[in-house]
Structure formats: structure tokens, C-alpha cells
Image (cartoon, rainbow, N blue to C red):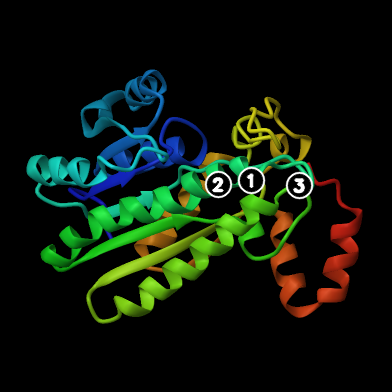
Amino acid sequence: MTFSNKVVWITGASSGIGEALVYAYVKQGATVIASSRNKKKLQQVKKNCGENENSCFILVLDMEQQDNYPELAENIINIYEKIDILLHVAGVSQRSSDEDISLETIRRIFEINFFGTVALTKAVLPYMKEQGYGHIAVTSSIVGKFGFPMRSAYSASKHALHGYFETLRAELHGKNISITIIIPGRVNTAISDNALTGDGKRWGKRDAGQAGGFPAEKASKIILKSISKKKKEVLVGGKDLIMVHLKRFFPAIFWRIVHRISPT
């Protein structure tokens, strides 16, 4: 699959994997709609595209404010006439035990990770059905495959994405609309910096495991290739991905490791 002349809408585009994907897609000749809450950072991402700057367009979007999603999707269609790929990267993590996390914070994590993602999908999907094709890629996590300490709400929100998008994939069978679930392990991004503590405050630091994680640029290349091949799922990361396979095939070993690993 070539991405030349494709219109790609990327959320979470102001940093990390989302930012790396912006650069990867414009380099491939795509027109990218780069979205996040932070307009200033998006402007820097656009500038960083260099000679491809004119292929990157900024659209400020808040995953907690979903009422205007249909209007935003319609505006993109009016300008670009299509949306070939919707790539959900935006999300928020957690650094708190379940005992200490408030229900309000749990609801906020779900609002951003699950409901915001679903709402934007529902705003875009009718246009993909009308144009007769499309691709939706959604970023989960390895803790969308298993539970992990200090991640109760985050893990649950990612499990929910699997249930929703696997069901949606089944319902869209035969309609030429593909769905890829991206499952990153520890990637070196600001996700731990911006994670929520139990009372909803920002964690504010790069965890050691995160800092030593898989490079975002390498992650973007794997994701790009997986979308081009219309893969249903793709694991992205380093040696920590073995946990997914251990959970499936050797659960006793998996749990022994989980009980020894530092949750941050």
C-alpha cells in the first residue's frame, strides 16, 4: 500500500508515537491532519516536517470534549473530500494503586482513552462507508492484554478498546474498512510524564522503564508497515513484549514475573 495522496488523521500528534507518525506519513506523500489539545506543540511538529510542512495541517482536538467531533469530521471532508486513515494515538496513562485512585480519575481515563476514541470513530465511520473504503488504527497497550500494578483504570480502558474494535471489525466485514489494533510495550514517550495519579494530578516524570523503552521513530515505522499490510493486530516494542506471549502460553511464569517487576 502506498500512502501518496492519502488523507491521514492522527490524534495525539503533538508528541511521542503520534508525532513520529506525522513525520513518517508526510515523508510517504500523505496529507496529515495532526490533532491534539496543544496547538503550540502541533505548530512545532508542523515546522519540524521541513520540506513536507505543507502536507501537515493542524486541527486542535480534545479527547474529553466530543460534541464537536461530527463537525470536525465534516470540515475535513469538505476540504479534503475523504479520510483514508484514522489513526488513534491520543491517550492517558495511570500511576496509582487501585486503592488510591478516585472514581472521578477512573472516569476521566475512560473518557479520554475509550469514549473519546469511540466518539471520533463514530464521527468518521459514516464517511468511510460512503466512500467505500477506509482504515482505522487504534492504539492499545500490552496492558490491554493483561492487568498490571498501578494501571487498573488504564488497563481496563485498553481492554475495552479491544472489545469494541474487535466487534466493530466483525461488523464491518466485507465493507472494505480495515481495523488495526496497535499494542505498544514500553516506548520512550511522555506517556508516563503525563500519567494521572490517584487524585487526577500529573505524574510528572519519565519512568526508568519508559526512558529506556523502544524509540518512537522505530515504533512509527512498524505501525506504518502494519497498516499498509492491513494487519489486525501489531505488537510494537522491545523485549517487554514477551509478557504478552507468556501470559497466553505460560501464565504461571507470567504471574511470577509480574509480582517481581517494578510497576513504574
Q: Give the distance between the C-alpha atoms of the residues marked 2 and 3, in whole angstroms.
A: 16 Å
Residue annotated with mark 3: 150
Kindly identify the residue that appears in the image at 56 percent across and 45 percent down: 109
Q: Amino acid at mark 2?
A: Arg
Verify CB contact (< 8 Å) between mark 1 and mark 3: no
Residue placed most toward the observer, 33 or 200:
200
The number of discs equals 3
The kind of secondary structure element at disc 3 is: loop
Q: Crowding at label 2, few (<14), some or many (≥20) Cα neighbours within 10 Å?
A: some
Q: Is residue 192 above or below residue 120?
A: above
Residue annotated with mark 1: 103
In the rendered view, does 53 fall on the left or right side of 132? right
Instruction: Report x, y in % for residue 5.
Output: 17, 48
Q: Give the distance between the C-alpha atoms of the residues marked 1 and 2, in whole angstroms.
A: 6 Å
Tell me which corner region of the image, top left, top right, bottom left or bottom right, holds residue 231.
bottom left
Q: Nearer the viewer, mark 2 or mark 3?
A: 2
Verify CB contact (< 8 Å) between mark 1 and mark 2: yes
Position of the C terminus by quadrant: top right
Residue placed most toward the observer, 162 or 54:
162
Instruction: Report x, y in % for residue 197.
Output: 69, 35
Q: Nearer the viewer, mark 1 or mark 3?
A: 1
Q: Amino acid at mark 3?
A: Met
The kind of secondary structure element at disc 1 is: helix
Kindly identify the residue that appears in the image at 44 percent across and 72 percent down: 166
Residue placed most toward the observer, 79 or 204:
204
Q: Is residue 151 above or below residue 104?
A: below
Residue placed most toward the observer, 113 or 65:
65
